Each structure stands twice: as structure tokens, then as C-alpha cells.
Amino acid sequence: MDDLKSIIRDIPDFPKKGIVFKDITTLLQDAKSYQRMVDLLAHRYIGQRIDKVVGVEARGFIIGSALAYKLGAGVVLVRKPGKLPSETFSKTYDLEYGTDTLEIHRDAIKPGERILIADDLLATGGTMSAVVDMVQAMGGEIVECCFMAELDFLNGRQRLPAGKVFSLLTF
């Protein structure tokens, strides 16, 4: 995995001073690395009867869509408010500097469907915790929350269902 990790570049002081941003665009633009990353993630879920993959705005769409294709599953989008055209279910959650809100179509997940939630990076876990709450409120069975990378020093997985978190890469 070190070869994949080495492709992800660090951007110091982005989006604000003191933060080192993990820029995954360098991995995504490298065809072989992107394909390998998707294949490694998808391999984990083959044969687990995933009904839908939930992708979290915006980079989670890139990973979630590719995984859904590989797994023969549907794709569900979780977006910022006002971006989905039909009736939505929303969740407001706390951030270190305020609050944010996410939305999902009310008819996107049916009770009992097996759901894989995908995003690019697990940091503090706030966003993913909100997505987990929405999926569970809609009756979805969470197979796992999967990430291309995790900043493990931020302990985000502690906010997510125990034993239901997988990260391909850790920093």
C-alpha cells in the first residue's frame, strides 16, 4: 500500500493554517493507481450482496460509483442541501467550527437493503456519522463504511459502528 500512499500529496495549510490536506487527486489522475485502489476496495465486498453503495459528496461519488459498478449495486448520493430534486431526508451535525447538513432522497434506501457507505477520507468521523444515522433511520443495513484513506490520529472510527469501518490506507 505504500506505493498508493506515496502518490497522495500533502498540501500544507489547506484549507486553513495548521492543517495538512491529503490531496487524493494525484492518485485519481493516475489510471493504474486509481484502478488498483478501486479493485482493492471492491475485492473486500465481492459476494457480500451489496444492494446499494452510498457515496458522500463530493469525492465519495468518485469512489462509491466505481465500487457500485464493480459490485453490481445501485448508487445513492448524499449531498449538501438543495442539490437533490425530490423529497429528502436531512441530518444536521456538528463540526469543529459550526454545523453542516446533508440530504438523501427519501426513497433512495428501502428497509432491509444492504448498504455500503463510501467516501475518500475518514478524519473526525462527523460527516460519516451523520450518513450512518440517515441510512439507519431509513431502515438500511450497514455492511460497512469504507474509505480510501484514514487519518487514524483523529480517531474518527470511534464515532462509527464498531467493527463496520474499513480504510485501505492509513496516515
Image (cartoon, rainbow, N blue to C red):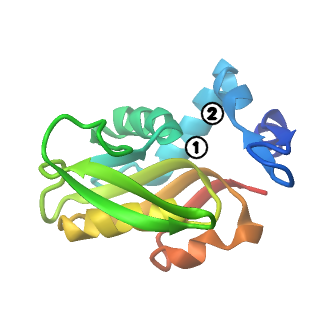
Q: Is residue 51 visible?
A: no
Q: Quadrant of residue 131?
A: bottom left
Neighbor class of circle 2 (other Cα within 10 Å; few <14, some 14-19, many 20+) is few
Q: Which sits in the foreground, 149 or 42?
A: 149
Say which residue label 2 marks.
Answer: 36
Quadrant assignment for the C terminus: bottom right
Task: Say which residue appears at 12% left-offset and 57% top-offset.
Answer: 110
Q: Is residue 96 above or below residue 73?
A: below
Q: Is residue 78 above or below residue 127?
A: above
24 vs 166, left or right, is right
Say which residue label 1 marks.
Answer: 40
Task: Say which residue appears at 51% left-offset and 48% top-offset.
Answer: 119
The label number, if any, that marks residue 1 in the structure image: none
Residue 45 location, x and y as percent?
42, 52
Element type at mark 1: helix
Give the amino acid type for the residue marked by disc 2 in the picture.
Arg
Q: Quadrant of residue 68?
A: top left
Q: Is residue 33 above or below residue 120?
A: above
Residue 150 location, x and y as percent?
67, 58
Residue 111 location, x and y as percent?
13, 64
Q: Is residue 111 above or below residue 19?
A: below
Give the amino acid type for the residue marked by disc 1 in the picture.
Leu
Residue 51 location, x and y as percent?
24, 50
Q: Which sits in the foreground, 153 or 93?
A: 93
Q: Quadrant of residue 157?
A: bottom right
Task: Say which residue appears at 15% left-offset and 65% top-offset.
Answer: 112
64 vs 139, left or right, is right
52 vs 160, left or right, is left
Decide: marks 1, 2 in contact (CB < 8 A)? yes
Cα distance, mark 1 to mark 2? 6 Å
Element type at mark 2: helix
